[in-house]
Image (tube, helix red, strand yellow):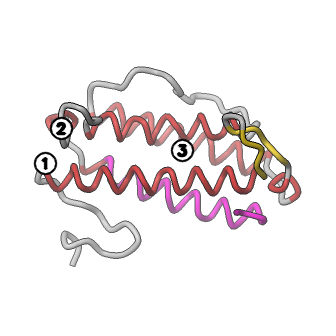
Amino acid sequence: MFRIKQDFINQYRMEANTTIACLKELTDESLDQAVSELDRTLGEVAWHVVQSVGGFADKAGIKVDGTTFGAPMPETVKDIVEAAETIYNNTLAAYDSSLTDEALIELVDFFGMNMPKGHLLYSMIAHQAHHRGQMTVLMRQADLKVPPIYGPSRDTE
């Protein structure tokens, strides 16, 4: 759980940059990569990660311009990356301007569960990491390079 705004901002910035680095390795052809017909495609997972950032902000009571929660997935990697950059920059600015250390202990409703805002924001970071893990498996299956995430990948050694 985050208790200090700047700790969250620093982690958020790092996670956003890492997710965008993954997105930039995708190709339009790879967006259809899936483990099976029952699972999300690489494009669907990538878009879910991007648009959920706005959803978490909304649940934290932070209003952000330019988020696309619930919007259909763009058809190209270029459009996904552009949307991601806009969403991450807008949410970062909104958090930086409106979040306080004191606000991190305020309770918020997250789908029927009351939790401190700092825990919700930690959950958003964990949510991104979880889905980036899925993305990297699908990226390997699509024969794409995987950028460094929490250390080097075999593609960066």
The quadrant of the rendering that contains the C terminus is bottom left
**Can you identify the residue that label 2 sits on?**
36
Q: Which residue appears farthest toward the left when viewing the image?
A: 143
Whichever of callouts 3 and 1 sits on the residue coming sooner in the sequence is 3
When asked about the image quadrant of residue 149, the answer is: bottom left
Amino acid found under the numbered disc labelled 3: Tyr
The span shown in magenta is 1-23
Amino acid found under the numbered disc labelled 1: Ala
Check whether the beta carbons of the residues at disc 1 and disc 2 lie within 8 A of each other: no
Task: Give the Cα separation between the discs numbered 2 and 3.
Answer: 30 Å
Front-lying residue, 53 or 10: 53
Q: Is residue 110 left or right of residue 27?
A: right
Task: Give the Cα separation between the discs numbered 1 and 2.
Answer: 13 Å
Q: Residue at x 66, y 34 (%)?
A: 111
Describe the element under mark 1 as helix, strand or loop: loop
- Residue 11 placed where, x, y %? 59, 63
Q: Is residue 18 magenta?
A: yes
The quadrant of the rendering that contains the N terminus is bottom right
Q: Is residue 116 left or right of residue 76?
A: right
Describe the element under mark 2 as helix, strand or loop: loop
**Can you identify the residue that label 3 sits on?**
88
- Residue 16 placed where, x, y %? 49, 53
Of discs 3 and 1, which sits in the foreground?
Answer: 1
**Can you identify the residue that label 1 sits on?**
142
Of discs 2 and 3, which sits in the foreground?
Answer: 2
Q: Is residue 105 magenta?
A: no
Whichever of callouts 2 and 3 sits on the residue coming sooner in the sequence is 2
Amino acid found under the numbered disc labelled 2: Ser
